Image: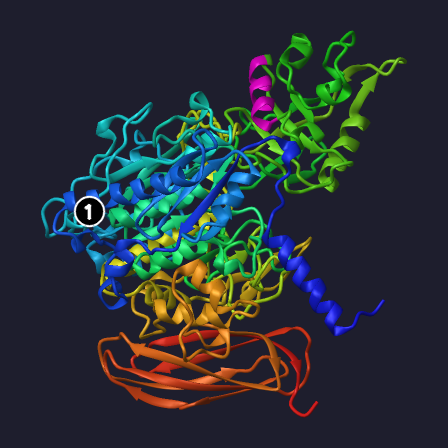
């Protein structure tokens, strides 16, 4: 079926309209939460020009005193109350938050479509956004990244690295009792707290699990935000804690990864797994709890970001994001994206997880060029376990578990063969080894029990932790978990948890089938089929000893991929996402013992967890080291430094690979951004690509389908008279063109931050089907000077697919600046 151009345009407009405006269903009978932005900008916004705020995340200095500022905040909140009271009947709404720092607006819980229409139709209202759910994107890594030898010594040693920097974490809170967060004696040249203490104004909210002593100098601020979660009925005070205390574990893990204390022993289930350290052990931690075991709501996150910037954090780490691409004309105009733009304008570097939707294309959930989006890699540390059978066969599996005693072989018994025959329990319940009362004590003692990973594990009705508990209670020698052929997945839940009894998970069908074949051939049965003699034997080796291959990193399969998208219609954008890759798989870090977020790890002080959530604090911690070394650099300069110095080769010198579905393939910038983060080079990048607020506005004004009014309603600032033609004109440390028709001219502006005059020679590896010309190809640039690079892209063939290249600038003082290129050539010159 073919449509005319006019009909296609109408269809497109209808889709865009219906994706932007959600229809209220009165049959639901539910209140809904909305974030309302007012026409008038916040007073601080009007007073703070970019030139004055470029490198300063504080703003209270624009008032004569703190008291004057508090009066201003109270007046803003009061004006929001008056506005709502003048329009709406009492009882038809409940204001949850007033946003006064970055945005002038509020979050409100409203009871009907009529109330919503009244608010939307007010001339004082600029925009209304429905609240959406947010989700979490969930030791060796400092060494793996070369930080102890390449960075910490230049910053005064490990304990001083990060000194002067406050990292804000929008997450599930923090466990203040963990040794990763205890107050440490300062060993630098300045006494007491760091320079930022004079401008950091955060406070500590007390409550259950979080006494006033929790803010101890390492933790310098802690607050929690739950009004939207409470209004939605998801918040449970018994489970979620009405305090900054981390009842989940995720927030403690991310905070300790970025800024946890140096050389903290990692003890789990009585075994010493080595030492853990944050990337920036000397940095301070400010906690903004807005996520819970069930996830969270955007309005709580927006309130947390507003507070963090008001407090004066230097870096924001968000291991969270939306569950899907936001509706509307552009993902970049979403209220959280815009608030993070304003945070960047205030001098705060924002690092966000790319998402865990990989390896699917365009699964990225961190969209905007002012955000540093982190992809996740697998490191070279592996935990493998092995089982040796009595017939001489050996199989590898997973399981951070101790070995069976000595080097003797133990009898093997299937769970079904040592359970009571008169039980009414299902075969699945028996095979999953979840119920100790089903086992016959005299038959199980001293044996290794075969259990099966059934669908109950997939739906969390069963767990490996319970298998271990059951085996311990019944006196068995250990356990083997085999795969159910009907599941066939190798992504098993709970395989990175530590257990206190010998055990192994055979997470592939070949090994599982071989084990069962051996067991069945060696088990003697009666005429009725019951087992009467168990002659199959095995022993399980120690699965807690790490091995290091030296061949990582590899892009993790779950790490979300580019290309970036403009909107929910998945039209691709002229923005490279992700930006940078960092370790994210099997990361040891702090946890909360009474975690409700992951029952596999409940009761532990440390956890081995994977996700782009884990990659994000690695990047935030490295950014803190760069910020300490270069305190006046803009957020864009710090991101540029990390990107242009990243590695695209693994530890053996071969190109980085990416996990795809059931295979490894050469990685591209849509897998790892600019590459794997290299902190030792990032603190001295030579050149940076600087970008400021006005440039981001020009970018927004060039997004296809976005008009001047859309930008003004989102940001409060209209498009400039002199507009950029393309989003690719934004001065980033990458070059992405999502639709090259013929040719395009692009300008990039570099600034010498190397401290000395330097001569650079430029080379280009061209994307397939694209000719790239750059001038000048050789240039000398003085310290702190800037110059323009003029780049022309010409499509030599219509590839109708993204192809990749690289622009490399090699300096006479050993600096190497690499810029990834991604181009989709849809039409060549003359075609």
**Which of 18 and 371 lies nearest the eye of the viewer?**
18
Is residue 42 among the parts visible in the rendering? yes
Residue pictured at 53% horizontal, 31% vertical: 401
Left or right, 69 with reference to 391? left
How many numbered marks, from 0 up?
A: 1
Magenta highlight range = 463-473
**Which of 599 and 308 lies nearest the eye of the viewer?**
308
Q: Secondary structure at mark 1?
A: helix
Left or right, 684 with reference to 268? left
Q: Position of residue 64 (x, y in %)?
A: 12, 51
Q: Say above or below: 260 vs 815.
A: above
Residue pictured at 60% horizontal, 13% vertical: 474
Q: Quadrant of residue 530?
A: top right
Q: Position of residue 371 (x, y in %)?
A: 42, 59
Label 1 sits on residue: 69
Is residue 146 among the parts visible in the rendering? no
**Which of 286 and 164 lies nearest the eye of the viewer?**
286
């Amino acid at each position: 079926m073919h449509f005319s151009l006019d009909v296609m345009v109408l269809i497109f407009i209808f889709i865009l309209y219906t994706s932007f405006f959600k229809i209220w269903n009165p049959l639901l009978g539910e209140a809904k939460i909305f974030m309302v932005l007012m026409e008038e900008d916040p007073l601080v916004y009007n007073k703070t020009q970019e030139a004055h705020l470029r490198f300063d995340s504080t703003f209270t200095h624009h008032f004569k005193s703190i008291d004057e500022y508090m009066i201003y905040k109270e007046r803003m909140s009061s004006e929001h109350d008056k506005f709502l009271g003048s329009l709406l009947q009492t009882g038809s709404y409940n204001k949850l938050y007033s946003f006064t720092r970055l945005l002038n607006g509020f979050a409100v819980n409203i009871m009907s479509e009529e109330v919503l229409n009244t608010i939307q139709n007010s001339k004082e209202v600029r925009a209304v956004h429905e609240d959406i759910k947010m989700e979490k994107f969930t030791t060796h890594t400092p060494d793996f990244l070369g930080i102890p030898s390449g960075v910490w010594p230049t910053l005064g040693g490990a304990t001083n690295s990060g000194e002067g920097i406050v990292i804000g974490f929008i997450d599930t809170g923090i466990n203040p009792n963990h040794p990763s967060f205890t107050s440490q004696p300062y060993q630098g040249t300045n006494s007491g707290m760091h320079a930022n203490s004079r401008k950091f104004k955060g406070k500590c909210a007390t409550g259950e699990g979080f006494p006033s002593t929790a803010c101890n100098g390492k933790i310098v601020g802690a607050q929690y935000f739950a009004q939207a979660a409470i209004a939605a009925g998801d918040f449970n005070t018994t489970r979620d804690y009405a305090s900054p205390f981390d009842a989940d574990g995720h927030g403690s893990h991310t905070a300790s990864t970025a800024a946890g204390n140096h050389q903290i022993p990692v003890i789990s289930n009585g075994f010493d797994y080595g030492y853990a350290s944050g990337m920036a052990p000397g940095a301070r931690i400010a906690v903004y709890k807005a996520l819970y075991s069930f996830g969270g709501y955007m309005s709580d996150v927006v309130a947390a970001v507003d507070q963090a910037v008001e407090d004066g954090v230097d870096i924001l780490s968000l291991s969270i994001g939306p569950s899907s691409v936001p509706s509307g004309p552009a993902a970049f105009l979403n209220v959280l994206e815009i608030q993070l733009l304003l945070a960047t304008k205030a001098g705060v570097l924002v690092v966000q997880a790319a998402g865990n939707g990989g390896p699917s294309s365009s699964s990225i959930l961190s969209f905007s060029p002012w955000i540093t989006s982190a992809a996740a890699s697998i490191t070279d540390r592996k935990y493998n376990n092995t089982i040796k059978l009595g017939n001489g066969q050996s199989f590898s599996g997973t399981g951070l578990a101790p070995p069976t005693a000595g080097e003797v072989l133990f009898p093997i018994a299937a769970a079904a063969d040592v359970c009571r025959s008169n039980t009414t329990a299902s075969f699945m319940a028996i095979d999953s080894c979840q119920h100790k009362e089903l086992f016959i004590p005299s038959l199980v003692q001293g044996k290794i029990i075969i259990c099966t990973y059934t669908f109950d594990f997939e739906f969390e009705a069963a767990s490996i932790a319970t298998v271990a508990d059951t085996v311990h209670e019944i006196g068995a020698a250990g356990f083997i978990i085999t795969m159910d052929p009907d599941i066939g997945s190798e992504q098993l839940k709970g395989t990175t948890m530590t257990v206190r009894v010998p055990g192994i998970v055979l997470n592939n069908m070949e090994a599982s089938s071989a084990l069962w074949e051996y067991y069945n051939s060696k088990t003697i049965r009666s005429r009725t089929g019951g087992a009467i003699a168990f002659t199959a034997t095995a022993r399980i080796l120690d699965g807690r000893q790490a091995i290091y291959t030296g061949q990582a990193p590899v892009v993790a399969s779950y790490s979300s991929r580019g290309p970036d998208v403009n909107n929910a219609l998945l039209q691709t954008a002229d923005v490279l996402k992700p930006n940078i890759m960092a370790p994210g798989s099997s990361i040891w870090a702090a946890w909360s013992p009474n975690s409700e977020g992951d029952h596999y790890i409940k009761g532990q002080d440390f956890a081995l967890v994977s996700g782009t959530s884990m990659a994000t604090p690695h990047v935030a911690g490295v950014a803190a080291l760069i910020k300490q070394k270069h305190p006046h650099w803009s957020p864009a300069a710090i991101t540029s430094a990390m990107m242009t110095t990243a590695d695209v080769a693994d530890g053996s010198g071969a190109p980085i690979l990416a996990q795809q579905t059931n295979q490894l393939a050469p990685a591209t910038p849509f897998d790892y951004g600019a590459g794997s983060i290299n902190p030792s080079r990032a603190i001295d990048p030579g050149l940076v690509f600087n970008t400021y607020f006005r440039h981001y506005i020009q970018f927004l004004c060039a997004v296809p389908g976005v008009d001047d009014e859309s930008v003004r309603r989102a940001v409060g600032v209209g498009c400039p008279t002199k507009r950029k033609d393309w989003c690719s004109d934004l001065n980033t440390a990458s070059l992405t063109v999502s639709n090259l028709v013929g040719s395009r001219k692009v300008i990039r502006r570099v600034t010498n931050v190397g401290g000395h005059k330097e001569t650079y020679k430029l080379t280009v590896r061209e994307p397939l089907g694209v000719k790239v010309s750059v001038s000048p190809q050789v240039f000398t640039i003085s310290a702190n000077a800037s110059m323009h690079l003029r780049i022309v892209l010409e499509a030599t063939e219509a590839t109708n697919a993204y192809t990749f290249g690289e622009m490399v600038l090699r300096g006479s003082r050993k600096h190497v600046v690499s810029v990834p290129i991604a181009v989709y050539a849809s039409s060549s010159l003359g075609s």
